[in-house]
Image (cartoon, rainbow, N blue to C red):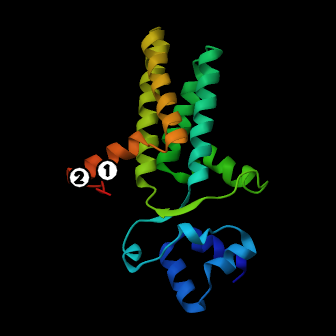
């Protein structure tokens, strides 16, 4: 198995990752030294992780996604182009349902990251809260789009600005409102949501 395939499997499947790491006794700093893909400080394997839905996600990919959302929505507002919130809503909804359709994250993965414009910041956690947050943002933008196309500009653009501010809070402060809602629903024992 080539190193690239090994790393691709490691980054997408935690069980494969643990098996390979245990069998071959690869050290994270060795992988990091060769590729720069894994930061050992942020990556810890314990046996409980084998039973979870956790995966390695790149926090910088999430930030790039949020920054892209902000830039596109601000552009739509400034130029009064109602089609841009429609586009962003479609990207957010598609990306929350199927990660391969997350246009901004894919652009980060295949363009920004290979150009080494931003270093990866991998962490081991569940992508579910982030996908849920993106789904909520997409739904709010759909409501915004409906209001804008009905001619209700003030409430329509207000909902767009709500998404902009929440994305900005995530970028600047690391507070993800959708993730917070996700975890609160988990604390209420609603099926499909995790409390932490």
Where's the N terminus, which quadrant? bottom right
Q: Is residue 92 above or below residue 7?
A: above
Q: Position of residue 55 (x, y in %)?
A: 49, 65
Describe residue 64's horizontal placement relative to residue 172 as left or right: right
Instruction: Classify residue 120 by image quadrant.
Output: bottom right
Q: Which mark is residue 183?
A: 1
Mark 1 residue element: helix
Residue drawn 41% across and 24% down?
143
Q: Is residue 133 left or right of residue 191?
A: right
Q: Position of residue 49 (x, y in %)?
A: 41, 73
Q: How far from the left and from the top, in percent, is residue 144?
A: 45, 22
Q: Residue furthest top?
A: 151
Question: What residue is drawn where x is 62% and y is 85%?
Answer: 26
185, above or below 165, in the image: below
Residue 119: x %, y % from top left? 69, 57
Where, by quadrant of the figure, is residue 39 drawn?
bottom right
Between 85 and 183, the one lying in front of the other is: 183
Q: Is residue 57 above or below residue 32?
A: above
Q: Are marks 2 and 1 in contact (CB under 8 Å)?
A: yes
Disc assigned to residue 187: 2
Gap between marks 2 and 1 measured at Cα: 6 Å
Quarter placement of the C terminus: bottom left
Total labels drawn? 2
Residue that sits furthest to the left in the current view: 188
Q: Secondary structure at mark 2?
A: helix
Residue 4 visible in the shown view: no
Q: Residues within 10 Å of mark 1 (few under 14, many from 20)?
A: some
Question: Residue drawn at (60%, 90%), measured in percent from left and top?
Answer: 24
């Amino acid at each position: 198995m080539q190193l690239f395939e090994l790393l691709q499997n490691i980054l997408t499947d935690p069980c494969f990752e643990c098996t390979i790491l245990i069998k071959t006794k690869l050290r994270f700093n060795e992988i990091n030294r060769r590729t720069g893909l894994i930061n050992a400080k942020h990556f810890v394997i314990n046996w409980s992780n084998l039973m979870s839905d956790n995966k390695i996600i790149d926090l910088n990919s999430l930030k790039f996604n949020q920054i892209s959302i902000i830039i596109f929505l601000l552009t739509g507002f400034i130029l009064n182009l109602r089609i841009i919130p429609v586009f962003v809503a479609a990207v957010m909804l598609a990306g929350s349902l199927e990660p391969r359709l997350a246009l901004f994250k894919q652009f980060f993965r295949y363009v920004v990251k290979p150009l080494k414009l931003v270093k990866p910041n991998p962490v081991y956690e569940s992508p579910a809260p982030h996908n849920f947050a993106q789904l909520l943002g997409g739904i709010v933008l759909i409501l915004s789009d409906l209001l804008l196309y009905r001619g209700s500009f003030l409430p329509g653009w207000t909902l767009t600005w709500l998404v902009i501010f929440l994305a900005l809070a995530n970028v600047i402060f690391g507070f993800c409102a959708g993730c917070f809602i996700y975890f609160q629903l988990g604390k209420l024992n609603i099926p499909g949501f995790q409390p932490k």
